[in-house]
Structure formats: structure tokens, C-alpha cells
Image (tube, coloured by chain):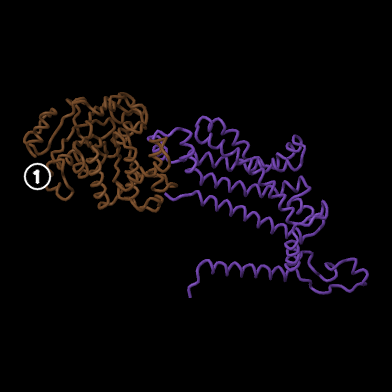
Chain colours: A brown, B purple
Amino acid sequence: MSNFISIEGISRRFGATAIFENLWLPMARGEFVCVIGHSGCGKTTVLNILAGLDAPTDGAVIVDNKAIDGPSLDRAVIFQGHSLLPWRTVLGNVAYAVSSRHRDWSRAQVNAHAQKFIDLVGLTGAEHKRPAELSGGMKQRVGIARALSIEPKIMLMDEPFSALDALTRGTLQDEVRRICTDTGQTVFMITHDVDEAIYLADKVVLMTNGPGAVLAEIVDNPLPKARSRTDFHKHPLYYAVRNHILDFLVERSRSFDKSGHDPRRIRHVTPGLPEPAIATDTSFASARRSIS
Amino acid sequence: MSVSLTWRAAIVSVALFACFVLAWHVATQGTGVTAKMDPEYAKLMGATATQGKSAMPGPLDVGATLWSHIRNPFYDNGPNDKGLGIQLAYSILRVLIGYSLAVLVAVPVGFLIGMSPLMSRALDPYIQVLKPISPLAWMPLALYTIKDSSLSAIFVIFICSLWPTLVNTAFGVAQVRKEWLNVARTLEVGRLRQAVTVILPAAAGTILTGMRISIGIAWLVIVAAEMLVGGTGIGYFVWNEWNNLSIVNVIVAIVAIGVIGMVLDLILARLAKLVTFAE
């Protein structure tokens, strides 16, 4: 399997303190990967490095066979705070991204393209409102529309729904899932919400506490790709996955034993399966086939 | 009875004004004939000595003079007798020229300082030393080098308007939210386009606040500057009327200076509101 994204031995150090050390992570095209870990473990730094906003002290990130060297329109970021420009309208915010992608487009072309993505996230009718007039959920929708409108190769999301109330969060998760599945988008998302990770991700990467954080293991999500919000939590393996991740967050993220941990070959686990085996890609695939 | 706060405040304002005017009127009234004296001698001594009338003009005198100025603001009877409107126009013109030049210099330099930590450190000592200098201290130097009193006044306005706008622009530019810059960076927006499309609108409110402080200071300084350079302007008018011992005209000028200052401030406050957006 050729990796679309490959994080290769990145570290980030400030002086003598290492936030994280020697992280390796491959991602395939079209994959939805969630990183879960406690605040301060360096998740956001990893995302910023992927975005090109920050540079690793050591190591490199390869995307589509090219090493990352600064930000790129191929990698869209949905920020934790919505980070909309308050002096621009909804349309203006999305159009700003579109016109950055397509410098030669006319204003009408830009606006038409932006409108398409505003419609996609369900904000039709609110185009001419400014961010201050929108609810938190609507603001984050604009952020999503802005990221999608540049039609990136990868979407990077930094706890995009953490500031929203539970109902709004649920609706937005549904929409992001639908849009990403429809468009085959590759997504790298940071979260600390276990259910969010199980609902959205193909793979959940567990990160230990910093300083010196490592990627402890990768949970291959055994839930079928076609899952729905109404019954994904009734799946027979749901609690196994949930308990596994929660156990990690509560206990093992602190006490993770780094001896014998090979950062280049992170253990894959599929909770709930008879043998949470050391997974090669083929054994993972067959395990998944056996449950679905 | 529910009367809106605006109306209640207006009523209190008017009542306070009425009390003030009444007290002023009573305080400056004459006390009547104080001493019997020869009519010829009394004429010589004036009303202050003979009838206990205050040397301070009352509100009615000031009102009448103010009205005559308003009715005929632009007369010109030679260098020492011009209408209040002409004098104010001279002052406003000088302020606007000096202030505009200051803004043209301060905003780009402030941008440079705000965007470049190197320039910020390098220019900081100069700004810290130059900022607290009273603008009037520059006057002799300006007169000596420029050799034109009117231009010197404009230069003094320029110098005093410079600092608040400069410092505020630098602050506003340096304080632009990192996320907004990151948005621009992930969209591969170039440095120049970033400055125009993100930094300028984000810092506009702070820049306008600096400009508002600047225009206030400029209007304070122009009166003093014109007292020194003379010739025309509201500052010169005040000093000239003092030499004429026309306290009525001095008070009228004070009122006019206050009103114009308020209008200038209101205009910039309105502009600042236009470019400030809630998040």
C-alpha cells in the first residue's frame, strides 16, 4: 500500500523539553483518522506541522510523495475556534478562500463557487450575515465550507466541534461524515471526544500524555463504514471499542510502557475481536470482513 | 411613567445648564450704586467701580456676542478684525493639513513596526524619547528652519498627531489574532495581500482609535501654537481679544473651540465604529 500521507519520525522540542518524540504514522488516501489524547499532549502541534504552520525539530512529513514545506492550499485546516474574519460576511469568508485558490477567476465565478459550498453546509440564506450574527454551530459550518471550497487533498481538523453544544455537534458530525464519505476526503482530525472518534474515524490513534508523548497504538474501528448516528452505539463491538479507548485515556495514557514500543510499527488493535492481534494490513482486513 | 434614558439625561443636562447660567447671571449682576461721586468722575471710573458691576461679562452679554458672531461669521475688516468663522476655518485647515500628513506617515511606519519585531526594537528608543516632547518645544526650531510661521504651526500639529496614531497602529498590527493570520497562511496568501486583506481590517479599529486621540491632541495644540505664531486662527483670536480686554469674545472663542473639538472627535468615533466588527 502506498501511503498518501506519511509522518516520518517527527519530533518537536522547545529547548530541552520534547513535546513529542519520533512519531511515525502512515495514512491512506480517503482515510478518516482521529487522534485522541489528553490536552497538552501535542496533538495540535502535530496538526500544525501537517498544516505547515509549524515545522518539526526532526523528521519530515510526506504528502502525496512530496515533503511538506510550509502551508499549502492542498491541506485545508478547520480551526478549533472558528477563526472567521469578522469583517467579512459568510459569503466573503468563503469567497476569500476560493479567490486564494483560483486567482484568475472573476468575482462572479468565485461567488458562485463559494455559494455552492455554503449551500452544501446548509447555510443558504445566511450568505450576507457577518460572523457575529451567527450561532456557534453556524460559524463552524462556515469554517467547514471555507475548508471544503478550496477542494483540498486533505482536511485537517483541530477539535472542530469542541465548542458546540451536544445537539449541534451531532448534526455537524453527521454532515462532515456525509460530505467526507461522498467526496472521498482524507481527514486528519484531533478530538478528545471518544464517541466522536468512534462515529467518524476509520482509525483512532491513541496518543500518550506529554512531555515526550508517543503514539501508543492504533485502534482499527471495527464498526461498518456505513454507520448511522441513531444506531452506531448499538453495534455489538461499540462498547468494546469505547471501553478500550476510555481505559487508555483514564489509565494507560499516563502509564504507557515505552519499553518494547516500536514507534515505526505501532500496534494495531481491534477491540472486541477474539484476538487483538498484531495486525498487518491483511490480517486487519480479514478480521474486519469476518465481523461485517 | 416611562421616559427613555436619553430623554431623562437630556432633561438633567438642560436643568444643569439653566442652573449654571442663572448662577452666572446673578454673580455678575451689579450691586447698585456703591458710592456717591461727581458724575464726570463716575464716567471716568466706569461701572465696575461706581455700581459694583462685575468685570466678568454675564451670560446675556456672551449670548448676544455669540449671536452676532453666528449671524456674521465671515466678515473681514483687516488683520485684527476677522469673523470667528474665518479664524476657525484657518485653524481647522492647519489641523487637517498637519494631521493628514501625520496619518500618512504614522500608518505605514506603524505597520512596519507592528509587522517587524526587528524594526520595533530598533525604532523603540527614538519613539520613547520623541513621544513625550511637548509639541510646542519644536516651535523655535521649526520657525528657525522653516522660516514661515504658518508652516511652523502645521509642523507642530504634524509632530503632535504623529505619536498616538503611530503607537496605536503598531500595537493594532502586532495584536492581530494569530488564527486569522494562520487562515491566510494556509490559503497561501502572500505577505502583501495578507497585510491588505487581514492585518489592515483587523487593526483598523485600533488605528482609528489612535487617529481619534491624535485629532484631539492636534486641536488642543493648535490654539497654543497660534497664540505663539499669531496672524490668523482661533488661538490668535483668543490672544488678540485678551489684549483687547474683550473677555466676552474670549469666552465665545472658548465655546467655539469646545464645539469644534467635539465635532472632530465625533467624526472619528463614527469612522471607528464603521470599521469595528464584533467577533
Q: Callout 1: residue from which chain?
A: A
Residue A250: x percent and y percent?
20, 41
Query: In the image, is residue A161 above or below residue B76?
Result: above
Q: Is residue B104 left or right of residue A158?
A: right
Residue B84: x percent and y percent?
74, 56
Front residue (pair A161, A121): A121
At label 1, counting other C-alpha atoms closer than 10 Å, the crowd grade (few under 14, some 14-19, many 20 or more) is few
For the N terminus of chain A, give its image quadrant. top left
Residue under the point 12% across and 48% down: A234
Query: In the image, is residue B119 above or below residue A172?
Result: above
Residue B191: x percent and y percent?
46, 33
Amino acid type at image mark 1: Pro
- Pick out the residue farthest to the bottom: B1
Front residue (pair A278, A19): A278
Q: Is residue B99 left or right of residue A150?
A: right
Residue A41: x percent and y percent?
28, 35
Describe the element under mark 1 as helix, strand or loop. loop
Q: Is residue A48 left or right of residue B46?
A: left
Front residue (pair B255, A29): A29
Residue under the point 16% across and 30% down: A267
Question: Dot 1 corresponds to which residue?
Answer: A236
Report the number of discs. 1
Query: In the image, is residue A137 above or below residue A97?
Result: below
